[in-house]
Amino acid sequence: MSTQSRYKSQIQKAEDLPNVLQTQTDWNSIKDCERSVFRSLDITLVAERKVTLLDAMDSEVKTIIADALEKGILVRREDGKISLI
């Protein structure tokens, strides 16, 4: 019997957000958005760093979100919510 493996898309850069986070496009806060990106982050991006894995992942998530906000992929609403465009 063959086993089916399900490939889960992972975030490597800001441009991956619309493809990976298709089911959720709005978050109540930047922290909620960070959690979503954190859960889908490609761990190979940070595995070689000389800091703890959690710190490296946190840093990468913040970098990706900042880049996405700068590029207009994510938008910060007046009420503090974050939306994927």
Image (tube, rainbow, N blue to C red):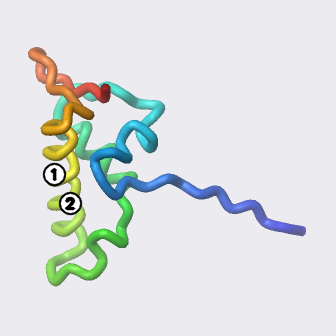
Name the residue rendered at 39%, 37% in the picture: 18
Question: Residue 76: horizontal and vertical position, in percent?
Answer: 15, 26
21, 69: nearer the viewer: 69
- Say which quadrant the C terminus sits in: top left
Determine the secondary structure under disc 1: helix
Q: Is residue 67 left or right of residue 37?
A: left
Work out whether 50 lies above or below 22. below
Q: Is residue 43 left or right of residue 19?
A: left
- Say which quadrant the N terminus sits in: bottom right
Name the residue rendered at 20%, 79% in the picture: 49
Question: Residue 71: horizontal and vertical position, in percent?
Answer: 19, 37
Kind of residue at disc 1: Lys
Work out whether 85 lies above or below 54. above
Kind of residue at disc 2: Glu
The residue that label 2 is drawn on is 60
Q: Could you say which quadrant of the image residue 25 lies in?
A: top left
Question: Residue 29: horizontal and vertical position, in percent?
Answer: 18, 30
Q: Most extreme residue toward the right, as rendered?
A: 1
Q: Could you say which quadrant of the image residue 28 lies in?
A: top left
Q: Is residue 66 left or right of residue 20?
A: left
Name the residue rendered at 49%, 53% in the picture: 9
Determine the secondary structure under disc 2: helix
Q: Most extreme residue toward the top, as rendered?
A: 78
Task: Determine crowd level at label 2: few under 14, some 14-19, many 20+ residues with C-alpha closer than 10 A.
Answer: many
Residue 62 badge: 1
Residue 14 badge: none
Task: Determine crowd level at label 1: few under 14, some 14-19, many 20+ residues with C-alpha closer than 10 A.
Answer: some
Q: Are marks 1 and 2 in contact (CB under 8 Å)?
A: yes
Q: Is residue 57 left or right of residue 6?
A: left
Work out whether 51 lies above or below 12. below
Q: CA distance from mark 1 to mark 2?
A: 5 Å
Question: Residue 38: horizontal and vertical position, in percent?
Answer: 30, 53
